[in-house]
Image (cartoon, helix red, strand yellow):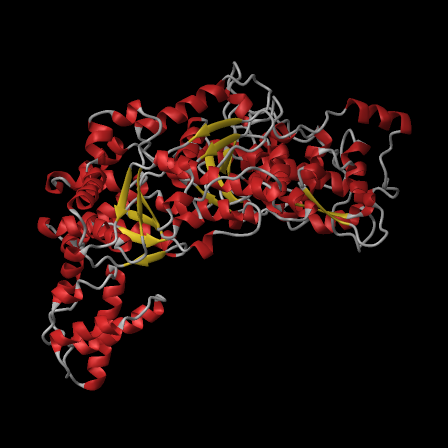
Amino acid sequence: MNDYAPWLQANDQYLATALADLRVRLQRAAQSPDAPAAPPAAAAAATTLMESAPAVRAPNGPKHSWFARMFAASPPRAPLASAPATTIDTPPVAPIVVEVPDSGAAAAAAPLPDDADDGKHTPALAVLADRLGLSTFERDLLLLCIGMELDTRFPALCAQAQHDPSRPYPTFALAFAVLDAPSWDALSPQRPLRYWRLLEIHQPGAQPLIGAALAADERVVTFVKGMNYLDDRLTPLLTALAPATLPPSQQAVADRLLDNLRHVLPGEPLPPVQLLGSDSVSKQAIAQAVAAAFGAQAYRLSAELLPAAVAEQETLLRLWQRESQLLPLALYLDAGEVEHGDAVAAGVRRFLARTGGLVFVDVREPWAVAQGLSVDVARPTAVEQRALWQRLLGDAAGAQPRQLAGHFDFNFDRIEQVARGALAAAEGNSAALAQTLWHGALAHTRPALDQLAQRIEPKAGWDDLKLPDGEKNLLHQIADQVAGRSTVYDDWGFRARMNRGLSISALFTGESGTGKTMAAEVLARELGLSLYRIDLSAVVSKYIGETEKNLRKLFDAAEGGGAILFFDEADALFGKRSEVKDSHDRYANIEVNYLLQRLESFGGLAILATNMKGALDTAFLRRLRFVVNFPFPGVAERRAIWASVFPAQASVGALDFDRLARLPLTGGSIQGIALNAAFMAAKAGVQIGMPLLLDAVRGEYRKLDKPVNEADFRWLESAGGKP
């Protein structure tokens, strides 16, 4: 038999004895011809009772906060928590009707059982009264209402005791008549019965409070009966945080928090803890680890679920405060998506100001919270991620742990998901494991970015790039640095020595159509990463603060790795800061400053493309690691482009690439001309020849507002003849 069974037996015996005494008191009042409807004490005596009664105890008070008791010199009395019922899935126990032999209506009412236990079994009602600060009269009044749920004889006895068949329920007047040491202040909203919502008061119309029907709250009834579980009014709003193994870097954060919290003086409220950063999974793991060190379970409450109405929020607050007295709980308030100035933020601050207990707040940046703690929470380090990849994948992993940790920034939960999914899909095939792992990791980074940017499927390879050797070498250096980040930053210790400058960013500058986008595709294909083009129309907003908000979402989504951010027409977003002449200039400069910070801290590869290099802010140029100039293609480059522009399956006639290369066109224009000529050939049912190409060239010239010199075209036509 476990410890719970004997405690429950003793608790049932306590309730049986206490309810039997209440029945005797009710029978005695029923036989009295003049049952008093109000306390017999005089006004002066009532005033004395009110002054001597203990005040309601706040949720973070020194004696009745279970956090404060953890630091007390002597341990508290054995609480109800010894019952295995701190979870919300405890099997329900049917209420019992306590059957005690009837002692007769004329029997004298014995005092209610003393709360003092035998040193081993403290009754649940005594625990409740102690933690919530009930006086003896309030405790007995609550038990009178609980008796209605546990004993079917109570309704009839209440009606008889009040000499009114229409009142088969307890009232304050009845309690004043049958219980010892009655006190008027028990009716006060600031006393525990009403403050903690222990009683439900049914007071229709103008009925006096003293005659209103009283009922015990269901959560209180089950607690007193021996079942301790989370209030079902809170269950839909809360999610229990799962325990997780913390890596050393995050365990150090948890240890610092514990050290700070343990230095709080007994009786002082614990300060709210702000967990800063973008990775909620890591923050939840740290919060649960700290809560577990206090013997508590942390529950997540989304800030979006906080009621907007003050009265409804107050009810939620009281219920949570009451639960934190009855169960070892900690609150994890998720406000990661809440902006500082909106209405939800005001509700969060109001809620935090009054919650009490151990509270964690998930925010991206620090909030102004009085006497709070703030800690930055980052994902596990690259070395820790690599070690977990290695442990999960085993010897068959090869070089995959290093590559995955270098390109993806995952928390431990995400790493376990990807690794287990890949191992199950590969089914022991080590050759397929590497590809399955890589695609699985990419799949986990896509959902967030797909909503914020346009994904480009990279198709171009190195052979498709027709650039001078110097520019090609720079592109190879970019690819090598991205691929070798793990070795240089982590194995060689550069990450530990440098706070900034670890980002890899490049500027592609040159005329439109010179191959900037193709080069980004080549890098993405070479590295096996996703390529996302940033749609400036979805990012830039005329409303103050909206651009930064959109950029923050974009960079946060890309922090997981596996993606290259490609800012086309970057001069529209990364322009020079201007002299502040009005508020518009000030906020425009703030946007540029924010971009500078996020670009420098971004862990992936960011590529900026522009045909107006001079329009970029010089601070951006200083922070860029590479600047690749895409020159207007020369004759040799144009010939190579013409020679490779047609797919092998296309029906192509005799073409003079040397003469076509003399046309001053960019690679983008050449590709467009080839495509238009192919459509004309398909329509006419002929091969792609020089005349069709030159017709397409004329159309491209007109599109670009270039003059068409027919003499040049006649000279070119002589190379291919007429169809």
Q: Residue at point 20% right, 85% down?
A: 684
Q: Residue at point 18% right, 59% down?
A: 638
| Vertical side of 491 occupied by 302: above or below | below
- Where, quadrant-wise, is the C terminus in this rendering? bottom left
Which residue of the protein is positioned furthest toward the front in this rendering?
711
Indicate the quadrant where residue 396 lies.
top left
Q: Position of residue 458 (x, y in %)?
A: 23, 57
Which residue of the protein is positioned furthest toward the top in this rendering?
73
Which residue of the protein is positioned furthest toward the bottom in this rendering?
684
In the image shown, does 486 or 623 lie closer to the viewer?
623
| Vertical side of 44 occupied by 34: above or below | below
Q: Is residue 663 left or right of 399 when viewed as pictured?
A: right
Q: Position of residue 425 (x, y in %)?
A: 18, 54
Indicate the quadrant where residue 461 lies.
bottom left
Q: Position of residue 268 (x, y in %)?
A: 60, 21
In the image shown, does 586 or 380 lie closer to the viewer?
586
Q: Residue at point 82% right, 43% down?
A: 210
In the image shown, does 234 or 472 lie closer to the viewer?
472
Q: Position of residue 11 (x, y in %)?
A: 54, 35
Q: Is residue 251 left or right of 320 when viewed as pictured?
A: left
In the image shown, does 688 or 334 lie closer to the viewer?
688
Q: Is residue 261 left or right of 664 when viewed as pictured?
A: right
Residue 275 visible, this orientation: yes
**Count of numbered circles on the image:** 0
- Where, quadrant-wise, is the N terminus in this rendering? top left
Residue 90 visible, this orientation: no
Q: Is residue 627 left or right of 113 when viewed as pictured?
A: left
| Vertical side of 78 occupied by 174: above or below | below
